[in-house]
Image (cartoon, rainbow, N blue to C red):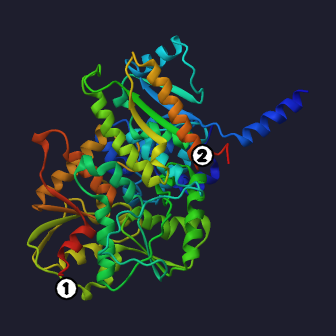
Amino acid sequence: MTIATDKLKSNRAFLCLECGKCTAVCPISRYNELFSPRRMLAEGLFYDAENLISDKLLWSCLTCQLCSQRCPVDVRFSEYMRDVRADAYLQGKRGNPSHGGALHYIMEMVSESKLKQNRTGWINGDLKVKKKGDVLYFVGCLPYYQDFFAKDFDFSPVSIAADTVKILNYLGIEPVILDNERCCGHDLYWLGQLQKFDELGEENMKQFEKSEVKTIVTACPECALVLKRLYPERLGSGKYEVKHITELVAENIDKFNFKELGEKATYQDPCRLGRYLNVYDQPRDSIKSIPGVEFTELAHCRRGAICCGTTNWMNCDITSKQIQKSRLQEAVQSGAGTLITACPKCQIHFRCAEMGDENEKTGIEITDFVNFIAKAIDN
Amino acid sequence: MAKSAEKTKKSKSKKVFTPNIVAFACNWCSYAGADAAGVNRLQHSPNFRIIRTMCSGRVTPAFVLKAFNAGADGVLVSGCHFGDCHYIFGNHKAVEQFDKTKALVKTLGLDERRVRLEWVSAAEGPRWAELINEFVEQITALGPSPLNHKKK
């Protein structure tokens, strides 16, 4: 078994200099010496890839693109991982999914077109939404996270959705919310289940077309990446513009009338929003423009930001925990009392790392960008 | 001859919906209860497949969702009565997990009556038979699950 040449070519694998910068910066390699991007690439290039495909560590890669950022010849390692995983998936190889794979089953189940989901229960009377309009708010997995994580982690994922609508209403936008929106398929894409990804994508694209929207707003960096780049890449482009909520807030920052908050805050760059979509300044500018907020940077920020430790709900282990703990320590060392992140998954992972041993708790407050902005809106 | 027999079988299965139910039963109480129902030769519906778990607390949302994803029409989770658990508080954990499961099933748009949590002790053979009959009847009334691709 070898990796197909066109796959190696399209991911620029032949250009590899074997300099090893990827392994030097990889957050997984830092805590788990058995994991090495350089070796994984070399195995696909020069050797029988059987070992690589059956290796459980294949599923550990965060696809955070920190290695591609540092690579002198721009080898697309994350995309290479996706292609190798697609081969491995066809051979029946699987990683160790977190939470028993419950979230992956949900992703697969919602691709069934006959299923009528009840996912709009979080819309309360104060929020103004429409059935038809120009702007669509793509909610993502938040209603499922509410059922799954809210009780254990003592936070409300749907409050992110509610606060996004609140911000949109504040800007005079009444968003459309699809009753039967499908999962964007982000995780399945990076796990190599491309057929399921396409099925989900087609279902979603059909619904976008039907509702005739011009702009799609999302509060999740993964949904933003999928809608902005992956759907057009695989399924053709739609007639709409995609914006992450941080971009929309930064564009309309003059329209906000913030009240004074008096907090010291820092910001975690989600890998999809930062390195994939190049959104670095917008969230920072928005946070800084709130009066009374003192903004500090983490030691690793912007292009060099370190991932929250797990992606795609896969292979969460002691390595992930160590990455999360070191990231939280960085936040404490930056002197901030609040860690703001623009990705609901980052928040779940950090909150998970804060559970357990009382002595190791950092006590830092973790909040979403949307919740932070909504808190500062003067009513 | 064989062909015509197959044909009648097919036309029958089209008319009558026979649900597929997955029943998770804990090793110490419910599985023994189901065994007791068999030993006592109590007649009950054959539409369910038992999966034995060591404790009902082991049945996380992932188990139930996997069953639905594979096309089950209903899922039964069954364990010891409170105070009878061999792991002391395993069935309390089962309740916690089941609350999550039920919420997820509801959000997914499946009828929440398709999942059920019941306590059956090792001595309650007749109750197991009664429970299965009742559950099969309920699922038959609800019809096939939208994720069941074999029956449309």
**Seen in the image, is B19 located left or right of residue B77?**
right
Q: B47 above or below A265?
A: above
Residue A48 location, quadrant: top right
- Asked if A339 appears above or below B36 in the picture, the reply is below
Element type at mark 2: loop
Residue A158 lies, in percent from the top left, at 32, 61
Measure the C-alpha gap from mark 1 to mark 2: 54 Å
Viewer-proximal residue among A240 and A42: A240
Q: Is residue B82 left or right of residue A182?
A: left
Mark yes or no: residue A66 visible: yes
The amino acid on which the numbered mark 1 sits, given as a three-letter code, is: Asn
Q: What residue did someone put label 2 on?
A: B143
Q: Which residue is mark 1?
A: A257
Asked if marks 1 and 2 fall on the same chain, the answer is no
Residue in view at x 54 percent, y 36 percent: A93
> In this orientation, does residue A39 appear?
no
Residue located at (23% from left, 73% from top): A374
Q: Nearer the observer, disc 1 or disc 2?
A: 2
